Image (cartoon, helix red, strand yellow):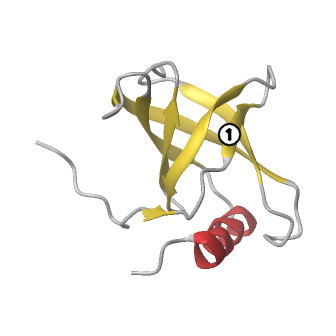
């Protein structure tokens, strides 16, 4: 049985690139996000039940910061509708109020309007 999300994820009008903080390698593109979790699309599956140290480059008008660094636990990884890619679901770990505000600003500025 699938667990219901507390907050609906918000799709953004474009995919932001997400990088591994340690290696600097791009791991995927942000598909949707809330202050509790996110989904990335990647060329390789991500390892479930692993904590990743990630960073996302932000548009200059969001939070006045160039990037947002965060830890996220991968909950699942499945084939995308395009077989060349994978969809990966993450839970954000220990998001402080400043990071939450940046995520909310990102959604407000670049989220699809429902």
For the point 86% across and 65% down, the residue is 60
Residue 46 % position (x, y): 48, 22
Q: Quadrant of the C terminus?
A: bottom left
Residue 88: quadrant of the picture: top left
Residue 18: quadrant of the picture: top right
- Disc 1 target residue: 18
User: Considering depth in this image, is 51 or 23 the residue closer to the camera?
Assistant: 23
In the displayed structure, does residue 96 sit left or right of residue 2? right
For the point 60% across and 51% down, the residue is 15
Seen as rendered, the residue at the extreme left is 1
In the displayed structure, does residue 51 sit left or right of residue 69? left
User: Considering depth in this image, is 23 or 114 the residue closer to the camera?
Assistant: 114
Give above or below for 74 relative to 17: above
Residue 95 % position (x, y): 63, 56
Q: Number of callouts in the render?
A: 1
Give above or below for 77 relative to 56: above
Within-10-Å neighbours for mark 1: few <14, some 14–19, many 20+: many
Q: Quadrant of the N terminus?
A: top left
Tag 1 secondary structure: strand
For the point 30% across and 35% down, the residue is 81
User: Considering depth in this image, is 91 or 32 the residue closer to the camera?
Assistant: 32
For the point 83% across and 72% down, the residue is 61
Residue 62 % position (x, y): 78, 70
Residue 51: quadrant of the picture: top right
Give above or below for 105 relative to 28: below
């Amino acid at each position: 049985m699938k667990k219901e999300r507390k907050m609906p994820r918000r799709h953004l009008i474009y995919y932001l690139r997400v990088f591994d903080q340690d290696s600097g390698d791009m791991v995927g593109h942000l598909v949707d996000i809330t202050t509790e979790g996110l989904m990335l699309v990647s060329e390789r599956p991500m390892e479930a039940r692993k904590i990743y140290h990630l960073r996302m480059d932000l548009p200059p008008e969001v939070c006045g910061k160039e990037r947002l660094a965060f830890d996220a636990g991968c909950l699942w990884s499945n084939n995308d509708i395009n077989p060349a890619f994978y969809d990966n679901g993450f839970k954000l770990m220990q998001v402080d109020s400043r990071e939450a505000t940046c995520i909310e600003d990102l959604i407000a500025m670049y989220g699809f309007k429902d």
